Image: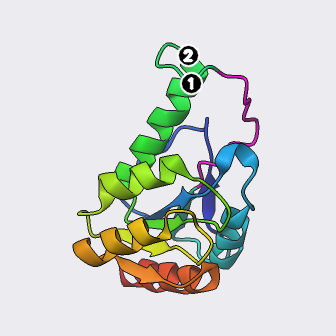
Amino acid sequence: MARVIKPPTAIPELSNSRCVFLAGSIDMGAAIDWQARVEQALADDAEVVVLNPRREEWDASWEQSIDNEQFRGQVEWELNGLEQSDVIACYFAPGSQSPITLLELGLHARGGRLIVACPDGFWRKGNVDIVCRRYGIDQVAGLDELIVEVCKRLRAS
């Protein structure tokens, strides 16, 4: 069974595992829970660790400040997870804004670990498409295709 790790649980040493980070639309909990679908698709693979930043007990009242321990911990957890993962699955949900996902795309565009799904209806689809083309990022049409490609990439790693 795949191991799913969410904040604030510490990310363990991952050197003997294949790891995927689920970067994508959350929008403070307003976006669809696409991460659950990826978790289900990987559930039977005992060698996989899924890093899912969608925190169960997110508190939207937390001040988004470096001085706020809970907020800073969430952001640092995400940065650590992105750096340690073998694959970064990036989903831009139609109708969402996803500013942090755009930031993550920019941070990891040259890393060779991204797979991006940006369906029609995402407000900055053109920008995402251009970045993916420029940096040779694997891009697929939607969530189902993203799941297929993540599974392929994890098997190959």
Kind of residue sitting beneath label 2? Asn
Of tags 1 and 2, the one toward the viewer is 1
The magenta segment: 52-62
The answer to whether marks 1 and 2 mark residues whose Cβ atoms lie closer than 8 Å is yes
Residue at mark 2:
68
Pick the quarter of the image with the N terminus: bottom right
Pick the quarter of the image with the C terminus: bottom left
Main SS class of the magenta portion in the image: loop
User: Is residue 71 positioned above or below 13 on the image?
Assistant: above
Is residue 43 one of those drawn in magenta? Answer: no
Residue 72 position within the rendered picture, expressed as x and y whole percent measured from the top left:
50, 25
Q: Quadrant of residue 137?
A: bottom left
Residue 54 position within the rendered picture, expressed as x and y whole percent measured from the top left:
66, 48
SS at mark 2 in the image: loop
User: Is residue 142 positioned above or below 66 on the image?
Assistant: below
Residue at mark 1:
64
Q: In the depicted view, which residue is nearer to us: 13 or 142?
A: 142
Residue 141 is at least partly visible in this image: yes
